Amino acid sequence: MARILITGAAGALGSLLRSRMKQWPVTLRLSDVAKLSDAQVGEELVQCDLVDMAAVLTLVEGCDFIVHLGGIANENSFENILNANIIGTYNIYEAARRAGVKRILFASSNHATGAYEVGQTVDTAMPLRPDSFYGVSKGFGEVLARYYYDKYGIESACVRIGSCFALPTEKRMLATWMSYDDFTNLVKCVFEIEELGFQTIYGVSDNAKNWWDNRLAADLGWQPKDSVDSYATDLSLKEDETEIAARLQGGAYNTAGHFDDGDSGARTS
């Protein structure tokens, strides 16, 4: 039976996968710096700070597949982003190399390309244009994943997650929304495909309004089934508050102030 590690398992998407993947014929190793609820059948709980390499080496031992969601999930000071998102991601990949883990899903973000203009179609071959330190950290993770594939053969899917929520909450999500089912099915596809190689893909549902072109990742075989359009006329969606947030794909991340290094932020690793 395969053992799948989920980092950031106490976060929103980690909790979602925990509930969905418990039906799979696998053992789930769930990790977070925060305390997790009691282990269920088929689960192993490991409290781990991803900045601690010794702890991460133990964490990944015996795993077959890693879903790396851990880290700070929004903009923060560079110091905090460096520790949680950059060093933490390096530790996961290096520990995977040492432990012989051969496949990782890296939770990247659309904020790695959030400085492109709204209305411009972006594919995964175009240069990174991050909108924040958070976006920079996700671009770093993608480059790191490429390095570990080319040099050590660790397969990776870098998933530039759009806006994965139960329902859209702002007008920007008419182009960026991804349903829980589409996200779960994408993780399943990455886990089950016979040969993954190195892939970068935007995680977004089949919305009529679309900024991102996934044709370069067509051989992954994932096809979103849901669409935000059925909600578009039923909800009052939040408007962008500034001109730059409305003009650029990353929205308000493009207007976030420069954090002082002393500022604190919640970490989910």
Image (cartoon, rainbow, N blue to C red):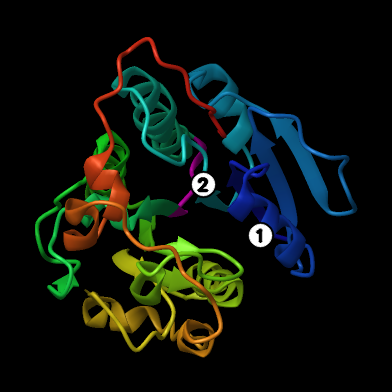
Q: Tell me, yes or no, if residue 148 can be seen here.
A: no
Q: Tell me, yes or no, if residue 222 can be seen here.
A: yes
Q: Is residue 180 left or right of residue 78?
A: right
Looking at the rendered image, the quarter that the N terminus falls into is bottom right
Look at the picture and state if 64 lies above or below 133. below
- Residue 37 among those drawn in magenta: no
- Which residue occupies the foreground of this view, 72 or 66? 72
Residue 116 place in picture, x, y as percent: 13, 60
- Which residue occupies the foreground of this view, 195 or 32? 32
The part of the image, by quadrant, that contains residue 218 is: bottom left
Q: Residue at x 72, y 52 (%)?
A: 28
| Range of residues picked out in magenta | 99-105
Using the image, tell me which numbered label, if any, was put on residue 17: 1
Residue 257 place in picture, x, y as percent: 26, 30
How many marks can you see? 2
What kind of residue is marked 1? Leu
- Residue 101 among those drawn in magenta: yes
- Marks 1 and 2 close (CB-CB < 8 Å): yes
Alpha carbon distance from label 1 to label 2 = 10 Å
Q: Residue furthest top?
A: 262
- Say which residue label 2 marks: 69
- Which residue occupies the foreground of this view, 248 or 266? 248
Q: Would you call the spot at circle 2 few (<14 residues within 10 Å), some (14-19), or many (20 or more)?
A: many
Residue 83 place in picture, x, y as percent: 40, 22
What kind of residue is marked 2? Leu
Upstream in sequence: badge 1 or badge 2: 1
Q: Secondary structure at mark 2?
A: loop
Q: Residue furthest left?
A: 127
Look at the picture and state if 88 lies above or below 168. above
